[in-house]
Amino acid sequence: MRIGITGASGMLGGVLATHLSKTHEIFATSRSKGVENKNIKWNCFDLTDIVLLNKWLEKTKPDMVIHCAAIINVDLCEESFDLAMQLHFETTKVIASYLGRNNGKLIYISTDSVFDGEKQGAYSESDLVEPLNIYARTKFMGEKPVQSMCNGLILRTNIIGWTKEGSTSFVEWMLKGLTNNTPLNLFYDVYFSPLSVYDLSLIVENIIKKPIFGLYHCASNDSISKYDFGKEMAKIFNLPSLNINKVSVNSADFKAKRPKNMTLNIEKISLALEYDFPSAIDAIKSMKRQYNNENH
């Protein structure tokens, strides 16, 4: 299959490109080139340039596009509404339109942040969406053309992983703090259901093989606070955790408001894929295995 991947030098896109290139022809796009092999064909450009995006689609003729590109800095989105709209909504509309005309499939990577976080328990696909910030609002707006313009699949998720040089992910920030014994303020009142990018790439591989469409929550099979996540990460990486401070998100000085509960109910996707989803602790262990592979 001919698969286009946007944001292909990013944390998820890079892993997807590498993994799926074993069995598919990959057409990767990003601002800068990432992993290279004979089955990955790169075209680097600004995705928000709609003329170039259309040219890329017409030239590569993908059967499927996995749309990973996003502004992952939530506070930056608060200051850059137009850019967030362009990347999360306008580009999605163009890709969905192309695939709708050409009977292709679009997998859109959305976010667990679309809810206000006030619910007790896990959010299901039918729960009311109430974004608290521009990142979540524009990502949710990007879901609309996926549902209405093509054979689309939306994955709301929360991923953890290692990035390439030049940027720092949540777990990289934590590992650096744990290693250097610098203070880490982690929230005891923010809950999420993280998946490692490596586990998500296996799930996407399963999705490609099945004719499933629509909206799915895709996450770990449980929930964990950011504070407990940090403690577990220290344990799994065999590092001291005395430098982890237990704080409330209410004390944080963020530009963008964050939901306190981002726990996702994965019953729908578990049944559709007949897949045994990992736990949050499994996600950390998956990260540790990858860390060992890349550093030894």
Image: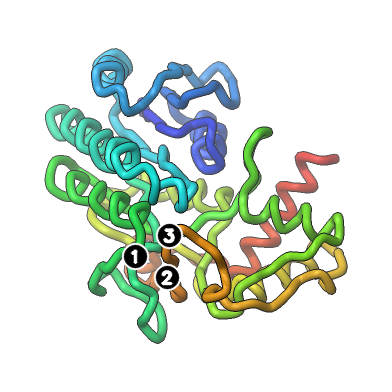
User: At label 2, which amino acid type do we have?
Assistant: Pro
| Residue 286 in sight from this viewpoint | yes
State the quadrant of the N terminus: top left
Amino acid type at image mark 3: Ala
Which mark's residue is nearer the viewer, 3 or 1?
Answer: 3
**How much space separates mark 3 and mark 1, taking CA atoms?**
8 Å
Up/down of 134 relative to 217, above or below: above
Which residue is drawn at the image coordinates 45% and 52% (left, top)? 74
In the rendered view of the protein, which quadrant contains the C terminus? Answer: top right
Compared with 221, 203 (above or below) is: above
Q: Is residue 53 above or below residue 153?
A: above
Measured Cα–Cα span from mark 1 to mark 2: 7 Å
Mark 3, secondary structure of its residue: loop
Q: Are marks 1 and 2 in contact (CB under 8 Å)?
A: yes
Instruction: Label 1, secondary structure: give it.
Output: loop
Residue sitting nearer the eye, 179 or 99? 179
Residue that badge 3 annotates:
256
- The residue that appears at 29% across and 50% down in the rendered structure is 138
Q: Residue at x 76, y 71 (%)?
A: 244
Q: Which residue is mark 1?
A: 132
- Judging depth in this view, the residue of 151 and 115 nearest the camera is 115
Quarter of image, res 43:
top left
The spot of residue 173 in percent (x, y) is 69, 53
N-term mark: 3 or 1: 1
Q: Are marks 3 and 1 in contact (CB under 8 Å)?
A: yes
Q: Is residue 95 above or below residue 141?
A: above
Measuring from the top left, give residue 47's x and y in whole percent: 35, 27
Q: Position of residue 38 (x, y in %)?
A: 55, 16
The residue singled out by tag 2 in the image is 259
In the rendered structure, which disc, 1 or 2, sits on the residue that comes first in sequence?
1
For label 2, the SS is: loop
Using residue 94 as the reference point, say whether residue 265 is left or right of it.
right
